[in-house]
């Protein structure tokens, strides 16, 4: 019997506002515990929340980018539950009437096809505080700095059919919120995290299976691992006669397994009701129009333009436009070189990306900037150095060697294009290898590569390969 996986993601993106969603306290990360929690965040009696307009602007921006409807009127509700990091005893969130609904994004699959994933809703809500269990002394502490930080919860339709698709979707939303500059996407600091809802069913079945919800996953890698584990667990459970129960589970990345945390609560357990302290959120048409004007070129549009203007494949274009910074870097290289888009793409995705990865840097921190890389590529194009030696030059530039020309000069890597100099080397090689020469002349064509190799070796790879080929052919023919 063949199984099918069904996945829906709830992504929490922390919005990049300076102050909290209902108070003026700062949202900056890393301050000493409880130094950025004001009376509103602490839930003192007699205080009133005031909605941060900037958070609304960011939610609308996201809604427009995914082609969703923006509700002219939406409502903040109280979601009631107790937790030590939630002093009010409720979280303010949007429930029945979210600000953004019914949008979609395209994801690229491995086989080059793309698929549309529906986004049911995106609503505004406040984050809770944090319990600190590592502080020692056998006690836990509460840090309320995060309490009241604005979140956009982005809820997808159960449209994904594999862990890979879920990762592609999560990456797409990550790329989008960063393009829109509404979230820094920092997953280590928890600014971008997701809950994955996972179920399985027999292929062809219409009805969804019972799902479990994997909580608070903060890396693309872990999402994939957690889903793969959970799918296998559910299949084995059903095949051995058991039943999946609706529950919340936690992914343990060290043990690579999911564990039950609690049985899944239903919406009505939370006793949602409209928050009497907050007026309904009304959004005027001209507010939306103004925001529409601020939308940047989005990843999909940029990708299409890269395919069209630079003649790149869909795959290359998708990689280069995954972040706005990388796309900007690439375009700066092409501009400085004055074309040769494919060569530039290969270098940005190849040597540059590998070096960035190796040193865990993002492109804005690259020690080789776009103009410097262009300077190197120009030396390949004008035959000063071979592509192979260019890699050596690049690494020297990466570790502080300066501009390409300086490195080439200093290391004496200039390509030999003087045909009489090449001829001299060929003569020496032919004289030193009489046996190979007569074998070649007797019809052993394969030996041509041997002679090329010898010449390149004798010139430390500096002879222009094309010239070596041409001159060797002539000389060996006798
Ligand atoms: P809740 O808010 O209680 O977690 P929702 O109905 O809002 O529940 O759904 C949350 C997420 O679960 C959505 O992303 C949705 O697509 C997904 N989902 C719902 N049913 C299933 C299912 N059977 N299998 C996988 N995902 C599901
Ligand atoms: Mg949920």
Image (tube, grey):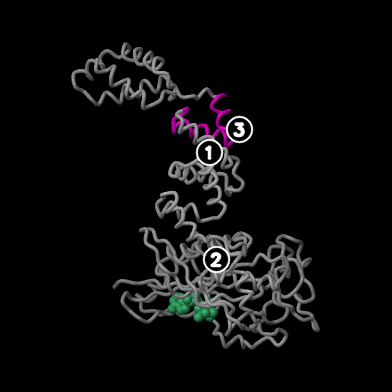
Q: Which residue is mark 3?
A: 402
Which residues lie in the magenta part? 384-410
Q: Does 433 appear in magenta?
A: no
Q: Which residue is mark 2?
A: 217
Q: Residue at x 57, y 44 (%)?
A: 359
Residue 311: where, in percent of width, then height?
41, 49
- Counting residues from the start of the chain, the first of labels 2 and 1 encountered is 2
- Dot 2, crowdedness within 10 Å: few (<14), some or many (≥20)? many
C-alpha gap between disc 3 and disc 2: 41 Å
Q: Could you say which disc has been placed on residue 374 in the image?
A: 1
C-alpha gap between disc 3 and disc 1: 13 Å
Check the image and report above or below for 79 versus 62.
below
Residue 399: where, in percent of width, then height?
59, 35
Q: Residue at x 28, y 19 (%)?
A: 474
**Foreground of the two, 312 or 476:** 312
C-alpha gap between disc 2 and disc 1: 39 Å
């Amino acid at each position: 019997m063949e199984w099918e996986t069904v996945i829906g993601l709830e992504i929490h993106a922390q919005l990049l506002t300076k102050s909290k969603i209902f108070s003026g306290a700062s949202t900056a990360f890393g301050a000493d515990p409880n130094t950025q929690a004001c009376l509103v965040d602490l839930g003192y009696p007699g205080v009133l929340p005031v909605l941060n307009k900037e958070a609304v602007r960011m939610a609308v921006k996201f809604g427009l980018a995914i082609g969703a409807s923006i509700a002219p009127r939406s409502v903040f509700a109280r979601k009631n539950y107790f937790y030590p990091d939630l002093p009010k005893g409720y979280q303010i969130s949007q429930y029945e009437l979210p600000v953004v609904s019914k949008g979609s994004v395209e994801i690229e699959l491995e086989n080059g096809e793309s698929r549309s994933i529906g986004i049911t809703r995106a609503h505004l809500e406040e984050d809770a505080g944090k319990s600190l269990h590592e502080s020692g002394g056998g006690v836990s502490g509460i840090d309320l700095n995060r309490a009241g930080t604005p979140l956009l919860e982005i809820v997808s339709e159960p449209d994904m059919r594999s862990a890979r698709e879920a990762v592609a979707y999560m990456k797409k939303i990550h790329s989008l919120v960063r393009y829109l500059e509404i979230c820094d996407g920092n997953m280590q600091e928890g600014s971008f995290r997701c809950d994955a809802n996972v179920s399985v069913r027999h292929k062809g079945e219409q009805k969804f299976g019972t799902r479990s919800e994997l909580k608070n996953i903060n890396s693309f890698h872990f999402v994939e691992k957690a889903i793969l584990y959970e799918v296998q667990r559910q299949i084995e459970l059903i095949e051995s006669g058991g039943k999946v129960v609706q529950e919340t589970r936690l992914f343990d990345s060290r043990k690579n397994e999911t564990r039950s945390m609690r049985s899944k609560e239903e919406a009505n357990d939370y006793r949602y009701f409209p928050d009497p302290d907050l007026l309904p959120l009304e959004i005027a048409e001209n507010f939306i129009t103004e925001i529409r004007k601020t939308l940047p070129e989005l990843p999909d549009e940029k990708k299409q333009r890269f395919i069209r203007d630079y003649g790149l494949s869909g795959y290359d274009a998708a990689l280069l436009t995954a972040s706005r910074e990388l796309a900007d870097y690439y375009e700066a290289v092409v501009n400085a070189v004055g074309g040769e888009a494919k060569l530039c793409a290969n270098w940005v995705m190849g040597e540059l990306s590998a070096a960035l990865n190796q040193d865990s840097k993002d492109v804005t921190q690259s020690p080789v900037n776009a103009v410097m890389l262009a300077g190197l590529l120009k030396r390949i194009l004008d035959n000063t150095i071979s592509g192979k030696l260019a890699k050596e030059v690049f690494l020297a530039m990466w570790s502080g060697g300066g501009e390409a020309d300086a490195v080439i000069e200093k290391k004496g890597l200039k390509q030999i294009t003087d045909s009489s100099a090449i001829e001299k080397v060929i003569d020496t090689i032919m004289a030193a290898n009489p046996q190979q020469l007569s074998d070649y002349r007797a019809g052993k064509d394969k030996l041509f590569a041997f002679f090329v190799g010898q010449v390149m070796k004798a010139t430390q790879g500096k002879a222009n390969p094309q010239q070596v080929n041409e001159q060797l052919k002539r000389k060996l023919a006798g």
